[in-house]
Amino acid sequence: MSLVEKKKRARTKVEKTDRRSFILSEAREMIDESGFDGVTMAGLAKRAGLAKGTLYLYVKTKEELFAQLFVEALTEYVSAVIPYLEDDAALIDAMMREAQAVPLFLPLMARLTTIIEANLSEEALIATKRAVGGEGMRLATEMAVARAMGSTEAFELVHALVVALQGAAQLAVPRPAFFDDLPEDVRGIYEQSNAEVAFTTTARLILKGAQ
Amino acid sequence: MSLVEKKKRARTKVEKTDRRSFILSEAREMIDESGFDGVTMAGLAKRAGLAKGTLYLYVKTKEELFAQLFVEALTEYVSAVIPYLEDDAALIDAMMREAQAVPLFLPLMARLTTIIEANLSEEALIATKRAVGGEGMRLATEMAVARAMGSTEAFELVHALVVALQGAAQLAVPRPAFFDDLPEDVRGIYEQSNAEVAFTTTARLILKGAQ
DNA sequence: TTAATTAAATGACCAATGGTCACTTATTGC
DNA sequence: GCAATAAGTGACCATTGGTCATTTAATTAA
């Protein structure tokens, strides 16, 4: 019987990390269901069966929580993409497919610098920047190996692809509630400029240019 | 003697549009000085010498105000870039130079979809989407002419460059107040991945791939 | 000139939300 | 069974975007 079901107090180290993990997983589901902006700390506490004050025993701030979720998603994403670095078409496909498959990756990436990092404590910012930078290095290193490139070129290529992904992620935003009422031409803009098309066309040109 | 100096009431159509213009220009300066997140409606009202309720006679919501500022900046940006479409190096240079030169362009672009558009009324969203889409069309049309490309290729190229700019804009974010206290390696990440480098390397690959 | 009318201006007020802390109480060890 | 420890709680606070009943400047009519 889990901590959560019994509503027991978390006394040991293990129980505390379990409770924190549970909070993170509830947060993940909440973003999935209600979107990034639909997450409130009061709502998350309620959902996790805790008082707000208790939630804050396990999480320093809202953004520190999002930062941790993003770093985890990014690590998963990079690992998922690494097997496909060699072939251009396979890489483009994998980068977009995994971006959509790894939960929360795109919505969190879209808000990384302007919202999440902008509200981080010094300590959390250091940890986040290092983790994100480290994953970029990992990807670049693997890229150099897979493509037998110089590390400088590999780094540049990864940088460009990440910039493209960051830009495309801006389009992975929930449609407005009144989407169906929008005029035809405006709906058309939504259809036409979605994250997938944006990333695919941009990445194709980047990879062609990198040959 | 202006409306503002005399604290007169705005009775005529002209006086009202003047007052609204004044509010917009104060908002611009406020973003410039205090950053996007430093703008509050109470602060803006005070700065403009108005009560908050008066501010809301001229502006529907905070995001509607930002959306209008962005559309104006985008129009100015596109016009400034159009003379440089032919040569690759000149285009990259112009796109980045003007992005930094046009006030507010990068910070507003970085927040366009996740913050600004996400909080717009249907009416304001329609106007914004149309205006932004229109500027994209304008740029693509000029690109096709300047480079003697097919309109499909021109549109694709513009799309990719805009995605790159959108991604790079995410890095045009104010440094934290405690930047100088950050460890050397973390400061290095900031130095290394700034908007200019990100856009330049990405755009270079895109343009090379588009040849 | 004065009174009546219009609508611009005001700021107290509200709701939502992130975060805090004095107090309560479950759990452990003696 | 009792005292000590610390996890848990929720009322409370500050900030902020936005509203509206009331005030009052400016215009028009008498």
Image (spheres, coloured by chain):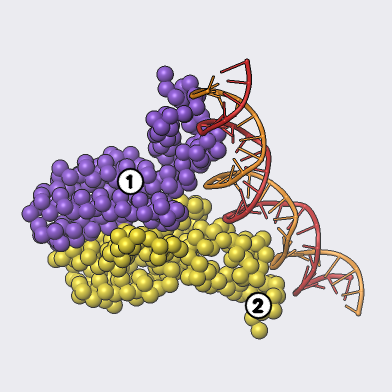
Chain colours: A purple, B yellow, C orange, D red
Q: Position of residue A11 (x, y in %)?
A: 46, 29
- Mark 2: amino acid: Leu
Q: Nearer the viewer, residue A63 or B66?
A: A63
> In the rendered image, which residue does mark 2 sit on?
B3
Tell me whether circle 1 and circle 2 mark residues in contact (CB < 8 Å).
Answer: no
The x and y percentages for residue B62 are 54, 59
Q: Does residue D23 appear to the left or right of A171 in the view shown?
A: right
Q: Is residue A26 visible?
A: no
Which mark, residue A71? 1
The residue located at (41%, 32%) in the rendering is A13
The crowding category of the residue bearing disc 1, from other C-alpha atoms within 10 Å (few below 14, some 14 to 19, many at least 20), is many
Tag in front: 1 or 2 = 1
Q: Chain of mark 2?
A: B
Image quadrant where residue D9 sits: top right
In the image, which disc is placed on residue A54? none
A186 or A199, nearer to the observer: A199
Residue at image location 9% in from the left, 57% down from the top: A149
The Cα atoms of the two marked residues, 1 and 2, are separated by: 52 Å
Is residue A176 depicted above or below B64 in this figure? Answer: above
Q: Which residue is found at the position 15% from the left and 44% from the top?
A: A84
Measured from the top left, where is residue A32 in percent x and y?
Answer: 40, 38
* Image position, residue B4 (x, y; %): 65, 76
Q: Which quadrant is the N terminus of chain B positioned in?
A: bottom right
Helix, strand or loop at mark 1: helix
Q: Which residue shows up at 35% across the image and 45% down it?
A: A70
At label 1, which amino acid type do we have?
A: Val
Dividing the picture into quadrants, the one containing residue B189 is: bottom left
Image quadrant where one finds the C terminus of chain B: bottom left
Q: Is residue C3 above or below residue A46?
A: below
